[in-house]
Amino acid sequence: MTLPTGSFNYANPRAIHWGAGSLANLGPELNRLQAKRVALVTTRSLVDEEKLLDRVRGALGEAEAAATEVVSQHAPMSEVDAAIAHTTEIGVDGIVSFGGGSAIDSGKMIAVKLADRHGLAYRGLPHVAIPTTLSAAELAGSAGFTNETGDKAGTRDVRLLLDSVIYDAELTLATPMSLWLSTGIRALDHAVEGILADGHHPFSDVMALEAVRRLFATLPRAKAAPDDVGVRTENQLAAWFSFTLPSASANGLSHMMGKQIGARHAIPHGVTSCLLMPHVMRYVARAQPDRMALLAEATGTGKDAPGDVEKLIASLGLPQHIADYEIGEPELRRAADELGDRYPAKDLLEIYLAAL
């Protein structure tokens, strides 16, 4: 038997800490990275959760927080640019992002822009993330933002990759359960997209299938016990496992279609995965029945992976219909037409309408 040849590039942050109390690693990590004057990049909801932000500030060790930069959902570029201007003015040598994907992606872009201004063409400023959702933005060497027209856009640069991630579930307890669970479905989408990606990827296949099993097992437990830090840690580990093939996982069809309607219609990323993933899986199954059968072994029935995913989303009480967001066929036809370069627009419209 001749095995296919291939290449695999490790593309996760160098250091990942997990478990309750792992915030204690923040100060030592900043010290290792020689970051003494940092900007905290976070969201309005976490600024309002003053005790949590104080805990992060209290864990900085020898570093000081010279600024707190606040960004909104979908990382509007106008807010990112304002944060870049402010942190340039006051001077910082590191970034600590605290929040979900919008805060973390904003922190990445700020870190790279400031590095450019420091003449560091080979890397961004040191960046440590403390995620409060399961979106896995902290694991990718890319960043998404909303442009001036309100559409989702993105940038890819190896310098966007973080130095360190801290998964401390104690800091996630204020995250609304609907957001926690929907970003858990986003993590599931990462794993599924990784399995269905073109090419051969034996290492990440093992991790992605384990992520699928763990998410199916632990997301319902998180819904049943919202304050169980141990279960939330299990969720975080599963989300990490889902994203060891980050480029392919973040550029699959479900993600692409979700981004096209998400920012434009104010639908969170996790929710777009809830709306679209089962229908995309049914479409992809036509060309990849063997890979879908492999997924079905991990989702439970061994027969119907898309159906299993659909049932999981329903059991978690998450949205399943695009129409709930006051979007109709004209808007979906526009989205499909705009994405029609990689897939036939009529096929994309079929998927969108199945999710309507």
Image (cartoon, helix red, strand yellow):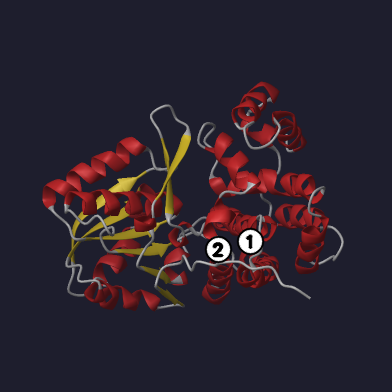
Spatial separation of the CA atoms under disc 2 and disc 1: 7 Å
Does any portion of residue 48 appear in the rendered image? no
The residue lying furthest to the front in this view is: 2
Q: Residue at x 63, y 66 (%)?
A: 201
SS class of the residue under badge 2? Answer: loop
Q: Nearer the viewer, residue 306 or 4?
A: 4
- Establish if 192 lies above or below 1: above
* Label drawn at residue 191: 1
Q: Report whether 112 appears left or right of 92.
A: right
- Establish if 55 lies above or below 188: below
Q: Nearer the viewer, residue 308 or 153?
A: 153
Q: Position of residue 141 (x, y in %)?
A: 43, 57
* Label drawn at residue 243: 2
Residue type, numbered disc 1: Ala
Q: Residue at x 12, y 46 (%)?
A: 89
Instruction: Tell whether label 1 touches label 2 (CB within 8 Å).
Output: yes
Task: Name which of mark 2 and mark 1 comes first in the sequence.
Answer: 1
Residue type, numbered disc 2: Phe
Q: Position of residue 150 (x, y in %)?
A: 45, 30
Q: Quadrant of the N terminus?
A: bottom right
In the picture, residue 300 is in which quadrant? bottom right
Q: Position of residue 163 (x, y in %)?
A: 34, 67
* Label drawn at residue 134: none
